[in-house]
């Protein structure tokens, strides 16, 4: 019977050379022995093969362990997102649920609820997805993503009261935050100050303006024409404003 | 330009002041559902969403959520829905939610007078924490008083309307306002000129509307029941539904899929009594 050749030897003829290079590099890896109380007692130099394979095995085990059992909220969140991204929605929801116990505050819990809602929604469990989005939105009322998920999933469930409440919450968020009174008063006073001292400001600009324009032309030589055009427009506007000002009766 | 600037400033200031009213009165949502039989002998499930208003009353240091009873589908302390033919309803379902974040209700306080207002206890205390409470007015309203009604007229933010009290009942239990109220104001608060709560808006006609006057004694006399007990009043157990369906299937039904009087006459007395007993448990239409 004809023996088949190893596929490795056909497609990777330099595998041996690469392996040898790894071994030589790994040969310089140090390993230390410690007693039970952590005291360093000896330093030995292991052979290349042993240290290389031990290191690979250890790192592989650690990676698998970390992937299988995330510890912190951040690790749970990252893993749940990775699982969601690879289409493993049930596992993503379960990981997010486990991570909820490690969450420090309501914001982190809301983020986990967001992952659960999307994962349940992707699985077609719209009732659970909608409830998760609602819980998350209660914890983080400023999240437009959770508000949108609430509307989307309650629309799927056909619950009119929940949908109406979700739509009200979303539309209320979309209207924008009202500007506070002190900011408005401050802006008004600043505008009034500029209006009162507009002539003095223009005199100052006449003095400091040309050096600034020259510096701008040097700094951005490609925008030289654009800068000159802006200056010309401003000068024209100022001339027109001066003419209107001089023609206006003094009783104004 | 100066005038324009200050006009814009004044407008923005006015709008920010109006937005502060959000936390006073909130929207209440109730989803009703009921199962009916169809001519094809199948059960059909219908849904209906109603919205109203609710607010928080501070009575002797205790906070109560106040709304109109019919916002929960209650009429005379009993769940009532309005399908075309209530006799065909097998079972009902209702869910009441408070505010934009859809908090549930744990129990309902029913007044002894069976008037159309209720007090509610939320499942989660957030509703009470996030809302500002109104103090009840010590003095009853009088004819000619100017009042404001706050409520939701189908938009995410509350609105308010000004009225004059044109009538107060002899028992001082309800007042009449001089104009109609748009839909959605049911359960809204009626405030006097001092900003104190005097009544809860409950009904409207073409040219005037009515509100129930509230006082601390009425809150003391409330009978508290779990919301499941209220919403479950008209629900029929599954075994009764099955028995009802079997009775309907056993005899010839009319074009509406129901048993007419002639057919009932021909029924054995046992089945007739059974049918009568089951029908008595069906919900009544809203009167």
Image (cartoon, coloured by chain):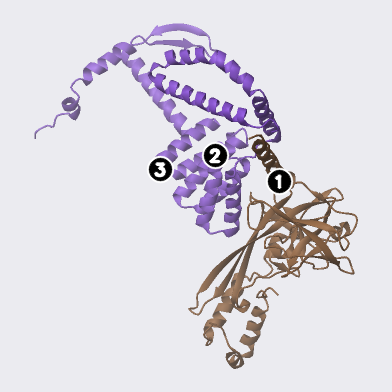
Residue pointed to by mark 3: A87
Chain appearing in brown on the rendered image: B
Quadrant location, the C terminus of chain B? bottom right
Report the residue at 74% width, 69% height from top: B207
* Chain letter of disc 1 in the image: B
Residue pointed to by mark 2: A112
Identify the element where label 3 is drawn. Answer: loop
Identify the element where label 1 is drawn. Answer: helix
Q: How far apart are marks 2 and 3 (CA)?
A: 17 Å
* Chain letter of disc 2 in the image: A
In the rendered view, tell whether residue A163 sits above or below residue A206.
Answer: below
| Residue B52 in the image, given as x and y percentages of width and height | 68, 59
Q: Which mark is residue B18?
A: 1
Q: Is residue A128 in sight in this rendering?
A: no
* Chain letter of disc 3 in the image: A
Q: How far apart are marks 1 and 3 (CA)?
A: 47 Å
Q: Are marks 2 and 1 in contact (CB under 8 Å)?
A: no
Q: Going by the image, does A218 lie left or right of A189? A: left
């Amino acid at each position: 019977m004809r023996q088949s050749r190893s596929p490795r030897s056909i497609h990777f003829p330099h595998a041996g050379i690469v392996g040898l290079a790894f071994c030589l590099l790994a040969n310089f890896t140090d390993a230390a022995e410690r007693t039970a109380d952590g005291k360093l007692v000896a330093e030995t130099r292991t052979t290349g093969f042993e240290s290389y394979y031990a290191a690979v095995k250890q790192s592989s085990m650690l990676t698998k362990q970390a992937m299988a059992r995330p510890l912190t909220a951040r690790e749970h969140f990252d893993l749940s997102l990775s699982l969601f991204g690879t289409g493993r929605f049930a596992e993503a929801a379960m990981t997010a649920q486990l991570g909820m116990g490690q969450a420090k505050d309501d914001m982190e819990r809301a983020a986990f609820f967001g992952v659960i809602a999307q994962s349940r929604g992707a699985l077609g469990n719209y009732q659970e997805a909608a409830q998760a989005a609602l819980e998350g939105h209660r914890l983080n009322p400023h999240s437009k993503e959770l508000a949108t998920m609430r509307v989307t999933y309650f629309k799927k469930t056909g619950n009119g009261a929940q949908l109406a409440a979700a739509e009200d919450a979303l539309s209320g968020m979309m209207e924008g935050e009202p500007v506070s009174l002190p900011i408005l008063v401050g802006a008004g006073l600043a505008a009034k100050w500029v209006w009162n001292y507009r002539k003095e400001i223009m005199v100052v600009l006449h003095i400091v303006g040309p050096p600034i324009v020259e510096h701008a032309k040097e700094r951005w030589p490609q925008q030289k024409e654009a800068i000159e055009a802006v200056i010309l427009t401003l000068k024209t506007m100022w001339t027109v404003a001066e003419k209107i000002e001089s023609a206006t009766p003094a009783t104004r | 330009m100066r005038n324009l600037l200050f006009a814009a400033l004044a407008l923005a200031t006015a709008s920010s002041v109006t937005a502060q009213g959000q936390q006073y009165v909130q929207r209440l949502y109730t989803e009703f559902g009921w199962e009916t039989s169809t001519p094809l002998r199948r059960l059909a499930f219908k849904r209906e969403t109603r919205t109203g208003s609710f607010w928080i009353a501070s009575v002797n240091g205790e906070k109560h959520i106040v709304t109109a009873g019919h916002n929960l589908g209650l009429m005379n302390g009993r769940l009532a829905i309005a399908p075309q033919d209530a006799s065909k309803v097998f079972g009902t379902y209702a869910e009441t939610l408070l505010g934009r974040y859809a908090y549930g209700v744990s129990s309902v306080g029913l007044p002894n007078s069976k008037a159309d207002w209720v007090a509610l206890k939320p499942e989660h205390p957030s509703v009470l924490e996030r809302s500002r409470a109104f103090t009840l007015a010590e003095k009853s309203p009088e004819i000619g008083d100017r009042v404001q009604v706050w409520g939701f007229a189908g938009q995410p933010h509350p609105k308010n309307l000004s009225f004059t009290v044109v009538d107060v009942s002899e028992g001082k239990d309800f007042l009449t306002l001089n104009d109609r109220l748009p839909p959605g104001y049911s359960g809204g608060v009626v405030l006097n000129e001092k900003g104190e709560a005097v009544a809860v808006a409950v009904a409207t006609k073409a040219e005037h509307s009515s509100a129930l006057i509230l006082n601390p004694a009425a809150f003391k006399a409330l009978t508290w029941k779990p919301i499941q007990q209220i919403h479950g009043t008209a629900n029929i157990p599954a075994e009764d539904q099955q028995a009802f369906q079997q009775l309907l299937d056993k005899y010839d039904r009319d074009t509406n899929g129901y048993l007419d009087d002639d057919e009932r006459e021909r029924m054995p007395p046992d089945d007739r009594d059974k049918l009568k007993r089951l029908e008595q448990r069906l919900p009544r239409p809203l009167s």
